[in-house]
Image (cartoon, rainbow, N blue to C red):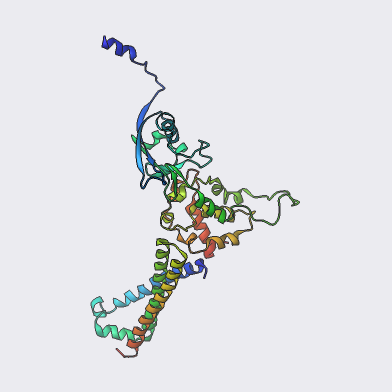
């Protein structure tokens, strides 16, 4: 009888379904009450297209709604869901579980950012340093007033900075940077890459003021060129290269 | 002083030191390494004015480069206005003291006071 019942319970094989499960370990930490973080473990099923963010949201929906995580667009555009996934800074919405090649997925808040709670971190330092380098075009002429109506650029001029314009301010580069860990005043790879983005823009006239801002004791010279910022960028920006180009300006190799 | 100026000095002193230390090491090979370090030989080196100038230059270059390197390490280790000022003044004092003491040794030996 039992055998009959078990056969009746069996689901017909679905050739499209590849459902597997992983152990999702989520770092839990509330700075108001906890001294150290602790990990909570959840078994989560996933398909080959399931992202880490979807797994975390599944935990929030079905197991523990109190897990704190910041997210918005779910398509690697807003830069909200940066976290350490199996020890590496990544966007949770841009990381498929199947790509991690592991039965255990550990998620923690990003390094070098103060934790608000669980996986959510404060971005004040990143936004402050980003704002400090004047992330906008400095030009006395206006596209509105000018006779030409717009500042024309050749494709080559655009190529000089366009990859750096892809930055989504997710903070993964700052999280991966070893100097950010030890130097709390370091301007960081995100802001330096953005400084280069505007310095290299042919429409911008604020090169000297930006170079002055980053040319200080906790500025560009504290970069050790570890290159980890470029490795973790989900948008293909190469902050380490931008930093070297900026150094070229300061050392007189570029003008 | 601007940080870029300091770092230009830092890189310049490193490159110059490599060149001069290479000459210094090659000079050891002229008489055989162990002989070149004998007491009389070392004193003779100090009495040669061109060699003494080179030693003085190496001393200055390495002191400037080394103490600035120490400043950079200490600034990355800890931050704070008072601390950073103390580090900056401290390394300048250390640099001057080392160059002063080394120069004293070089000059006294050159003048036959040792």
As displayed, is residue A82 above or below residue B36?
above
Q: Position of residue A227 (x, y in %)?
A: 43, 52
Q: How many marks?
A: 0
Quadrant in the picture for residue B71: bottom left
Residue lying at the far front in this picture: please name it.
A33
Quadrant in the picture for residue B104: bottom left
Residue lying at the far right in this picture: please name it.
A147
Residue lying at the far bottom in this picture: please name it.
B112
Residue at position x 54%, y 53% from top? A128
Q: Decide if residue A253 is in sight here.
A: no
As displayed, is residue B16 above or below residue A33?
below
Residue at position x 39%, y 19% from top? A14
Q: Position of residue A174 (x, y in %)?
A: 46, 51
Seen in the image, is A219 located left or right of residue A48? right
Q: Position of residue A3 (x, y in %)?
A: 26, 11
Quadrant in the picture for residue B24: bottom left
Q: Decide if residue B4 is in sight here.
A: yes
Which quadrant is the N terminus of chain A positioned in? top left
Q: Position of residue A246 (x, y in %)?
A: 53, 58
Which quadrant is the C terminus of chain A positioned in? bottom right
Q: Nearer the viewer, residue A226 or A124?
A: A124
As displayed, is residue A196 above or below residue B82?
above
Q: Nearer the viewer, residue A6 or B32?
A: A6
As displayed, is residue A208 above or below residue B63?
above
């Amino acid at each position: 009888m039992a055998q009959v019942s078990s056969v009746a319970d069996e689901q017909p094989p679905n050739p499209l379904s590849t459902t597997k499960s992983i152990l999702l370990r989520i770092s839990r930490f509330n700075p108001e009450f906890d001294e150290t973080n602790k990990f909570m473990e959840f078994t989560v099923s996933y398909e080959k297209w399931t992202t880490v963010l979807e797994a975390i949201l599944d935990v929030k929906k079905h197991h523990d709604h109190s897990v704190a995580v910041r997210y918005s667009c779910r398509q690697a555009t807003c830069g909200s869901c940066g976290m350490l996934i199996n020890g590496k800074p990544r966007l949770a919405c841009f990381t498929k579980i199947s790509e991690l090649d592991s039965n255990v997925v550990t998620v923690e808040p990003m390094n070098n950012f103060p934790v608000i709670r669980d996986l959510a971190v404060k971005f004040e330092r990143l936004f402050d340093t980003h704002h400090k380098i004047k992330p906008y075009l400095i030009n006395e002429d206006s596209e509105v007033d000018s006779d030409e109506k717009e500042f024309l650029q050749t494709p080559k001029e655009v190529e000089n900075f366009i990859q750096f314009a892809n930055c989504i301010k997710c903070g993964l580069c700052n999280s991966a940077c070893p100097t950010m860990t030890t130097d709390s005043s370091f301007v960081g790879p995100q802001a330096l890459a953005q400084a280069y983005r505007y310095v290299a823009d042919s429409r911008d006239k604020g090169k000297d003021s930006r170079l002055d801002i980053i040319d200080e004791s906790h500025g560009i010279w504290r970069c050790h060129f570890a290159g980890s910022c470029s490795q973790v960028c989900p948008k293909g920006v190469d902050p380490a290269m931008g930093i070297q180009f900026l150094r070229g300006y300061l050392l007189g190799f570029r003008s | 002083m601007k940080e870029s100026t300091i770092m230009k000095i830092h890189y310049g002193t490193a490159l110059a030191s490599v060149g001069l230390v290479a000459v210094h090491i090659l000079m050891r090979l002229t008489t055989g390494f162990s002989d070149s370090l004998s007491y009389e030989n070392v004193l003779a080196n100090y009495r040669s004015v061109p060699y003494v100038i080179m030693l003085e230059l190496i001393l200055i270059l390495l002191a400037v480069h080394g103490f600035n390197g120490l400043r950079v390490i200490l600034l990355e280790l800890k931050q704070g206005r008072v601390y950073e000022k103390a580090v900056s003044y401290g390394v300048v004092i250390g640099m001057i003291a080392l160059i002063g003491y080394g120069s004293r040794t070089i000059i006294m030996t050159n003048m036959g006071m040792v």
